[in-house]
Amino acid sequence: MIYDKSQFPFCSVLEENWELIRDEYYSTTLDPILWPEQQLNEFERWSAYPIWDWPDGNPVEPHIHSVPFTKSLIETHIPTHKCAGFSIFLPDTYVIPHNGLPGDWYRLHLGLKIPDGDAGMIIGTEKVEWEEGKCFVWDDRVRHSAWNFTDSDRVILIIDFVPDYDEYLKKDNTSENRTRFKT
């Protein structure tokens, strides 16, 4: 399921700043790591540059300090974020159909470097193609697959977030979450 991004005001903030986010990513000197779910992708062609880890949203040292602008945007505009980071598909990457973990969050993708050609996703029955500088928000629990069958890398910013803070606290009212998701 893909949601109307106008429901989430932070999408416009990210889109207005996408070039600064992209440039900050390219200025980093730390190497990406393999995506944690390599069973979904043969040949280790999917990597990540985590800012907050998957799936818990704990800060990733030292990566979190290498992208201060992006970190600040996320903390300021998406206080209920969980994991966040950059996802990199090398050329000829295919992520098999799968469902994400259960939870109360949605996933945001912001296109940063999208090569011309065949790169996209199927979410449920909907085909989506990334666009540079554009966000889309979707439910990661819905069966989906993704690919980059081009000659260039594809880079996006991924952010998992809880869409309704009040509803989230009703379901998971632990002191850890009350502290983590202070508004």
Image (spheres, grey):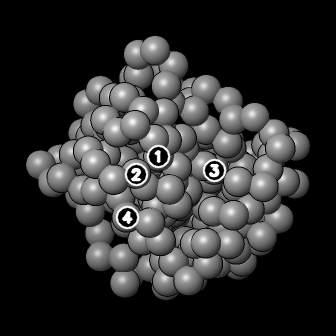
Cα–Cα gap, marks 1 and 3: 14 Å
| Marks 1 and 2 in Cβ contact (< 8 Å) | yes
What is the secondary structure assignment of the residue under circle 2?
Answer: loop
Quadrant of the drawing holding the C terminus: bottom right
Q: Quadrant of residue 62?
A: top right
Q: Residues within 10 Å of mark 4 (few under 14, many from 20)?
A: some
Q: Which mark is residue 154?
A: 1
Q: Which badge, 1 or 3, is on the more N-terminal residue?
A: 3
**Image: 20 above or below 47:** below
Residue type, numbered disc 1: Arg
- Counting residues from the start of the chain, the first of labels 3 and 4 encountered is 3
State how far apart marks 2 and 3 are (Cα). 19 Å
Q: Position of residue 81 (x, y in %)?
A: 61, 61
Report, in whole angstroms, how far the alpha carbon at label 1 lies from the one at label 2.
Answer: 6 Å
Of residues 57 and 85, the one nearer the viewer is 85
- Marks 2,3: beta carbons within 8 A: no
Q: Which residue is mark 3?
A: 85
Q: Secondary structure at mark 3?
A: strand
Q: Which residue is found at the position 18% from the left and 52% from the top?
A: 127
- 65 lies above or below 87: below
Please tell me the numbered disc located at residue 37.
none
Packing grade of label 1 (10 A; few <14, some 14-19, many >=20) is: many
Out of 176 and 118, give the one closest to the viewer: 118
Name the residue located 35 percent from the left edge and 58 percent from the top edge: 130
Crowd class of label 2 (few under 14; some 14 to 19; many from 20; radius 10 Å) = some
Rendered location of residue 112, percent (x, y): 52, 60
Amino acid on which disc 3 is placed: Gly
Tell me: residue 164, above or below residue 108: below
Give the labeled residue for mark 2: 115
- Badge 4 is on which residue? 131
